[in-house]
Image (cartoon, helix red, strand yellow):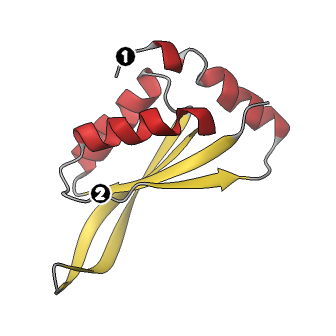
Amino acid sequence: MDAVCMVMTAVGSEAVAEMLAQQLVEDRLAACVQVMPVKSFYVWQGESRKEAEYLLLIKTRAALYAQVESFILAHHAYETPEILQLPVTAGSNAYLQWLGASTQGAGDQAL
C-alpha cells in the first residue's frame, strides 16, 4: 500500500476553501478534504494578527504531495501560504485502501 499523508493549508474565505477542496477531489489529488473554520493568531511582517480562516485537511497519497503543493500555490491568495505535509503512520486498513483507490490516476492528469 502506498504511503499516505495529510496536507494542511488555511485560506481566508469559505468560498476559496470549498473551491480548493472540490477541485482537489475532482482531480483525484485528494480522497477527502475536510474544511473547518478556525481563528489563527500569528505575527506577519512584524505585526500581531488574529484572522478568521478556513483550515483544509487534505487526505492523499505521499506520492502526490508535490502535485498538491503546486495546486495550492497556483490557487492560493496568500503571499506565503501554510502548506504542511503530515505523515500518516497508521490507520484503518479499509480507509487507507479507499484513500488509495480514490486517488489512483491523479498523476496522469494535468494541473
Left or right: 18 as drawn, with respect to 108: left
| Nearer to the camera, 53 or 64 | 64
Image point 34% across, 35% down: which residue? 71
Residue 56 place in picture, x, y as percent: 42, 51
Q: Secondary structure at mark 1?
A: loop
Measured Cα–Cα span from mark 1 to mark 2: 22 Å
Percent x, y of residue 25: 46, 28
The residue that disc 1 covers is 110
- Amino acid type of disc 2? Pro
Residue 37 or residue 84, whichever sits in front = 84
Residue 48's tag is none
Report x, y in % for residue 27: 43, 21
Say which residue label 2 marks. Answer: 81
Q: x and y percent of residue 47 in the render? A: 15, 85
Q: Residue at x 25, y 60 (%)?
A: 80
Horizontal side of 4 relative to 85 (left or right) equals right
Instruction: Pick whichever of labels 1 and 2 is earlier in the sequence.
Output: 2
| Residue 69 left/right relative to 14 | right
Instruction: State the quadrant of the C terminus.
Output: top left
User: For the residue carrying disc 2, how many other residues have a C-alpha within 10 Å: few (<14), some (14-19), or many (20+)?
Assistant: few
- The residue at the point 24 percent across, 39 percent down is 75
- As helix, strand or loop, the secondary structure at mark 2 comes to loop
**How many labels were placed on the picture?**
2
Amino acid under disc 1: Ala
Near-viewer residue (17 or 75): 75
In the displayed structure, 59 sits above or below 50; it is above
